[in-house]
Image (cartoon, rainbow, N blue to C red):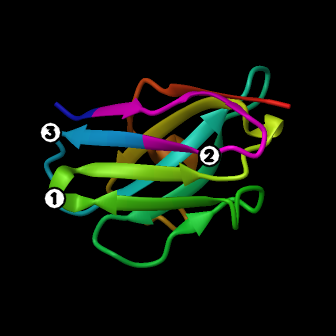
Amino acid sequence: QVQLVESGGGSVQAGGPLRLSCVVSGYPYRHYCMGWFRQAPGKEREGVATIYTGGGPAYYADSVKGRFTISQDNARNTLYLQMNSLQPEDTAMYYCAADLIPCKVARIPQYKNWGQGTQVTVSS
């Protein structure tokens, strides 16, 4: 059974950093697309950043380019999201997801494996 467990969320002042982690277990494939997504109250879930665990470019939402960095540690089966210069509009529940789909064109409904989420709250 595939499990994704996020951690690292919390409350931070605007301009501050946070690093999220997502540990994956039980996935039967060695390489797959993984990503970070977020959902603010009253809004639809949106993609933040995705990366293929086998290597290649990362993809970012325009709203986080230059501030967020997605990375992975395959030895630890862990995905990270380094978030710098956080702003109040970054406040949301952050989820990681994984699936055997092409990262560049994958749509959110195509991801079948999700974590439970970790809350990020940025105050001004």
Return the mark for residue 17. 2
Q: Earlier in the sequence, mark 3 or mark 2?
A: 2
Rate crowding at label 2 as few (under 14), some (14 to 19) or many (20 or more) other CA atoms within 10 Å.
some
Q: CA distance from mark 1 to mark 3?
A: 14 Å
Q: Quadrant of the C terminus?
A: top right
Q: Nearer the viewer, residue 123 or 95?
A: 123
Q: Amino acid at mark 3?
A: Gly
| Element marked by disc 1 | helix
Identify the residue at image location x=34%, y=60%: 72
Q: Is residue 19 magenta?
A: yes
**Badge nearest the viewer, 3 or 2:** 2
Identify the residue at image location x=77%, y=56%: 63
Q: What residue sits right under mark 1 in the picture?
A: 75
Left or right of 5? Residue 93 is: right
Q: Amino acid at mark 2?
A: Pro
Left or right of 89? Residue 51 is: left
Residue that sits furthest to the right in the current view: 124
Identify the residue at image location x=22%, y=35%: 2
Whether residue 3 appears in this view of the structure is yes
Q: Amino acid at mark 1?
A: Ala
| Element marked by disc 3 | loop
Q: Which residues are magenta?
A: 4-20
Q: Nearer the viewer, residue 102 or 77?
A: 77
Rate crowding at label 3 as few (under 14), some (14 to 19) or many (20 or more) other CA atoms within 10 Å.
few
Rate crowding at label 1 as few (under 14), some (14 to 19) or many (20 or more) other CA atoms within 10 Å.
few
Q: Earlier in the sequence, mark 1 or mark 3?
A: 3
Q: Is residue 83 magenta?
A: no
Q: CA distance from mark 2 to mark 1?
A: 25 Å
Residue 55 percent across, percent down from the top left: 33, 75
Q: What residue sits right under mark 3 in the picture?
A: 26
| Element marked by disc 2 | loop
Answer whether labels 3 and 2 touch (C-beta < 8 Å).
Answer: no
